[in-house]
Image: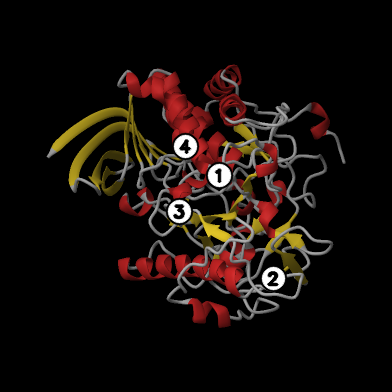
Amino acid sequence: METTHTDLFIAGGGLGGCAAALSACANGLQVVMTEETDWIGGQVTSQGVPPDEHQWIENFGSTRRYREYREKVRQWYLENMNVNDKKSLFNPGNGLVSNICHDPRVSLHVLQDMLMPYVLTGQLTIKLNTVVSEIKREGRTLHSALIHNLTANKETRMTACYFIDATEAGDVLPLAELEYVVGAEAKSDTNEPHALEVADPQDIQAITHVLAMEYREHEDHTIEEPEMYIFWRDFHPSIWPDKYLSFYAPHPITKEKREYTLFRQETGFPLWDYRRIFDCEQFNSWVYAGDLSLMNWPQSDYFLGNIYDVSEQDKKKHLYQAKQLSLSLFYWLQTEAPRPDGGKGYPGLKLRKDVFQTEDGLAKAAYIRESRRINAEYTVVEQDVSPEFNEARTGKFYEDRVGLGSYSIDLHPSMAGKTYLDIPALPYHIPLGALIPKDAENLLAGCKNIGTTHITNGCYRLHPTEWNIGEACGALVAFCIKTEASPKEVRESKELLQTFQNELREDGFQLEWPQEFYEKR
């Protein structure tokens, strides 16, 4: 068996993994990064989730490299498409969720472009269609990872100085036999106001299998009835105000019955606009091209079972049923959804299989909102970000901060049958301690697997924060190798920590919000 050594091994090529690779390579490290699918980018590409961002993102609240990524996305459209109005804050899809709602294929191109200089020189090796199947650990030190190429059915042993787990579900943690948390903690463990009285490892947020669709009015693109359509058509969860396949869902905040519509009308929330990635009215095209939108809606959340820490059979079953839910919702929209004119169905909806380059038209991977979480040196709790516990306009001001982020605490329905939890959270800081496991010296958490709780995962899981986490991990590995200090030693030494934070600032990290954010509300 081939054995390869590298400075840094990154498991998972999502946003966190890509950001970690960029940062580590820029600091001179040799890096190997694996990715389970054939697309890097994670939630923004293979999972089909356009950037979910805070209101200040155009000006501050992210790293310089994340802003470069966003600008490159915009510039691709402005330079390669015939855009009617080339405004500076161009939003390709005019989607409601983001100022840069765009096609996942564009993000894939941009990320590949950003990483390409390091790939060309051999500094970065990206292994697609590859998973980690084994970790060798002695005491607190990880020594190697056995990686398995799913296409070639080939195994390679990777040894490294440092490891980053940037997988979508924290897959390295059980392989390394490290402590980790899943589901919801008990109030006695975290003292969080919204925590459960008793811990529930099944209280994990829903997954979603996204699909892409175009609307071509007066045409018929009705798909074959999905195998589980009757089940999903008749499905009425106890936490839902109507049948699941309907234009009704609980309001995430009030829990009252909320009406949705497919397209914009006088009343109801327009689902089509929410994650629209191509607004055809903004482009002059030589062929007819309708709007494109991504289906990641309340009605496509799958919460009948988890896909990690279960048997392979159960994993396959739940992934299949999640896909069937999305396809059934799409088929319902085509055939049975009530229209404002009194008719039924929108047969002009076209499943765009080319967007994700898959045979079934669904995203290459399920969108996983909630991962396994490390037993961290510091765990972010609700009190750290809640306006009820902080007088300023920001959450807790950590001495070991390595970045910023902002999003409400947004928990989707869970595998345990819990409904939404959507409560305010202040603009927050990212503590270095949340990236460092208590039981490993040379492993960092580089994705949604950091030291949060079930509750605070709801605001630390979005795109700019995941990028910042990964980029900070890459920078930290380079700093540790240079100073011959461990991540824990960097955090605990005031001199090392300040030196590291200054290097982060020089490299485009923002560690503080504008001064007015620290004034009392």
Mark 4 or mark 1: which comes first in sequence? 4
The numbered mark, 2 or 4, whose residue comes first in the sequence reads 4
First of labels 1, 2 by sequence position = 2
Mark 4 to mark 1 CA distance (whole Å): 33 Å
**Residue pointed to by mark 2:** 247
Q: Residue furthest right?
A: 521
Picture coordinates of residue 477 (x, y %)? 42, 28
**Which one is closest to the eye, mark 1 or mark 2?**
2
Q: Amino acid at mark 1?
A: Tyr
**Residue 86 position (above or below residue 420):** above
Task: Name the mark on residue 378.
Answer: 1
In front here: 66 or 166? 66
Name the amino acid, label 2: Phe
Label 3 neighbour load within 10 Å: few <14, some 14-19, many 20+: some
Identify the residue position indicated by label 3 in the image: 353
Looking at the picture, which amino acid does disc 4 mark? Leu
